[in-house]
Amino acid sequence: MDAFKNAKTVKVNPDKPQEQARFLALEANKTLLVPTPRMRRGLFNRVVLPAGANKSQLRECCSFQGIKVNSAPVGIAEKYQVDLVVIGSVAVSETGIRIGKGEGFADLEYAIMSAAGAANEDTVVITTVHDCQVTDIPESLIQPHDLTVDFILTPTRVIKCSGGIKQRPKGIIWSMLTEEKFQSIPVLKELRDKDDEAGIDTSLKPSEDEGGRKRNSRQRNNRRDPRPRRQRARRNRDKEDEPPKEDEENKPAKRTNNRRAPPQCPPGCRIFVGGVTRRTRVSEFKTAIRAKGVYPKRVVWRGARGFCFLEFDVPDKIEDDVTLLGDIAFNNVQLRPQIAIDREEKKDKKAVNGEQNETQGDEGAKQNMKSED
């Protein structure tokens, strides 16, 4: 097709179904740009072929692992023009409306390219799908940040989309980005600073989790249930009228706690993280540590007191995780991670310190008695 023949720079997403499209772009000596997974390490990588690469090597360079080895990052400030975009879809209509995986990365990648001046109205957008994925999609589903396509490629036909809305995001719509997603994509920070300088409103969308918790709590507090609430049966009701036993008169009443005890963490599998500011949200914290490759089994959050604990299943990589966490800062305050001391170790240290204090106290008493004599 002419759109492919005339293109010099082609951007193709890194998924397996588009591997053949990446191969054809390299075989035709075109500049191939591939987005980094979830844009955590920049925006694009430019595939760099070995000198004199044959078809077998081209195939290898198109694979997910081959892109990691044979590519160079493309900076957001670098000047380039993308002529053709190839993306995947879960479903697409012949009018060009597509449905993706639901995370919005294809739309956001195009919006970032547009904001950087790398894409415009002339940039052709193609989606490759199976024939069964072509279906009717109502235009009412389109949102301002959505990207429509110009062509649909299936194993049996080429469809030129027509009769519908052609939509291209001209920049980033900040009000549709959550804080969590913003923090997980480093390149957005640079673009947000530029928009701030230009006087553009860069307010982010409130976190969905936070809104859901508030909404659920309001529903619980304001519910109007006509059914009477079930009262808890008091334990040992028959024993209330019995006179207390002599041994039990002076004993303090035992407190009952029906809450489930937290799961026990194996020894040496906890990291204490200090330097957590009160303004740091747990969602921001989790996003930042995952971006560094730290995946705890459980986060015990004590942000209001300036620290938290990370719990893991095994201690194999815990020292490496401590090093990675030390590179993170929130609100210009560096985190202070260290391997947490287990409770048993604390008890042992207290016991040792107590014995030392008793020994020193006995020796001091003996010396005082000698001096008195």
Image (cartoon, rainbow, N blue to C red):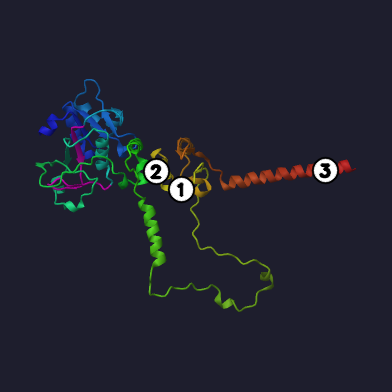
Mark 1 secondary-structure assignment: strand
Q: What whole-number distance in Å separates the C-alpha atoms at marks 3 and 1?
A: 51 Å
Say which residue appears at 10% left-offset and 44% top-offset.
162
**For marks 3 and 1 on the same chain, the one whose residue lies earlier in the sequence:** 1
Determine which residue is flagged by label 1: 299
Marked residue nearer the N-terminal end (1 or 2): 2
Label 2 SS: helix
Residue 129 quadrant: top left
Find disc 3 in the rendering and name its residue: 366
**Alpha carbon distance from label 1 to label 2:** 12 Å
Measure how far apart labels 2 and 3 are at the Cα level: 60 Å
- Density class for disc 1 (Cα within 10 Å; few <14, some 14-19, many ≥20) is some
Q: Residue at x 21, y 30 (%)?
A: 81
Mark 1 or mark 2, which is nearer to you?
Answer: 2
Q: Which mark is residue 320?
A: none
Span of residues in magenta = 82-102
Contact, mark 1 vs mark 2 (Cβ under 8 Å): no
Q: Position of residue 244 (x, y in %)?
A: 65, 74
